[in-house]
Image (cartoon, grey):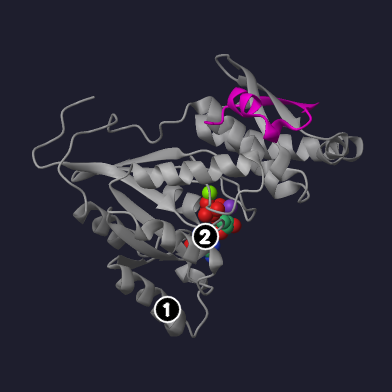
Amino acid sequence: IPQAPANYKSGFIGIIGRPNVGKSTLMNHLVGQKIAITSPVAQTTRNRLRGILTTPQAQLIFVDTPGIHKPHHQLGEVLVQNARIAIESVDVVLFVVDGTVEAGGGDRYIVELLAHSQIPVILGINKLDEQPEESAQLDASYAQIAAANNWELAKFSALNGDGLETLQQLIIDRLEPGPYYYPPDLVTDQPERFIMGELIREQILLLTREEVPHSVAIAIEKVEEAPTITRVFATIHIERDSQKGILIGKGGSMLKAIGSAARQQIQKLIAGKVHLELFVKVQPKWRQSRTRLAELGYRV
Ligand code: GDP
Ligand code: K
Ligand code: MG
């Protein structure tokens, strides 16, 4: 890692918020590459992912976290624990809320969690592009929460990028002088294989019914790089035989659709041609087992 210029700043920014407010979309836009998958389904993000933005002034390391919610099973506990750890180990917290709706119970739970933290907090109102005409009251209620806690306020659209330059500067203003933590050209700490698995999971989230997404985990078995094509072999782990039927679909149509869409995403990731082979394996109760979670690549 090269030495940073004089007066260089750097630091870790925890992006937290309840599910579906746009945390992963925001991180992807800020670092300029799709490293975290996004979808309308809660719990899309399962791991803490780092996204790295290196500018001439500063290196910003964003930590994307699973949405905070009350734990229901082992996987849920792991998610909440990850978010708590993220809060404790960062320099700035970016607390993202959905600007199209009023603050709800989930937001208040996070406000409580953050009230005990000594770290600078920026309350980020997202989805500016979709705010209703009469949004002044919405904004005012969020501004009140920020003022009551001595937090900075920012408004932006993670989708179209409006307001993100201002947000970026607001974050840099709150960072201390520091080194490059990562090489300036690196965009994420995640191995390519992990992102490949996530891109497959994203298509399952987008294409299948409610009951499948939460019980799915992807293992990349093998990646063969040939001069003209990269061959990727992956196993989709699910919990029940009934889900296998949904995932494979009539005459294999669903698995084909998932594979085709995921293959295109992986091609973008590696900037090359990809052949993708998917296998489906039923593994009962993988969500309850910390050992299995670890085997499948989750930090437990
Ligand atoms: P997360 O669960 O907080 O990580 O949320 P995601 O990034 O997965 O986004 C959840 C949903 O909100 C997705 O369908 C996104 O496309 C959508 N979304 C995220 N940011 C914006 C935004 O700025 N505007 C609009 N209209 N939708 C957004
Ligand atoms: K989501
Ligand atoms: Mg997410």
Whole-angstrom CA distance, mark 2 to mark 1, is 17 Å
> Is residue 198 shown left or right of residue 89?
right
Residue 76 x, y percent position in the rendering: 61, 44
State the extent of the magenta-drawn residues as a range.
Answer: 275-300
Above or below, 82 relative to 1: below
Q: Residue 31 in magenta?
A: no
Q: Residue 288 in magenta?
A: yes
The answer to which quarter of the image holds residue 174 is bottom left
Q: Secondary structure at mark 2?
A: loop
Give the camera-side residue of 94 and 287: 287
Q: Answer yes or no: disc 2 within 8 Å of ligand 1.
A: yes
Labelled disc at residue 21? 2
Residue 68 x, y percent position in the rendering: 52, 53
Labelled disc at residue 141? 1
> Is residue 293 shown left or right of residue 54?
right
The answer to which quarter of the image holds residue 140 is bottom left
Above or below, 53 relative to 173: above
Q: How many marks?
A: 2
Residue 251 x, y percent position in the rendering: 91, 36
Amino acid carrying mark 2 in the image: Val
Above or below, 25 relative to 183: below
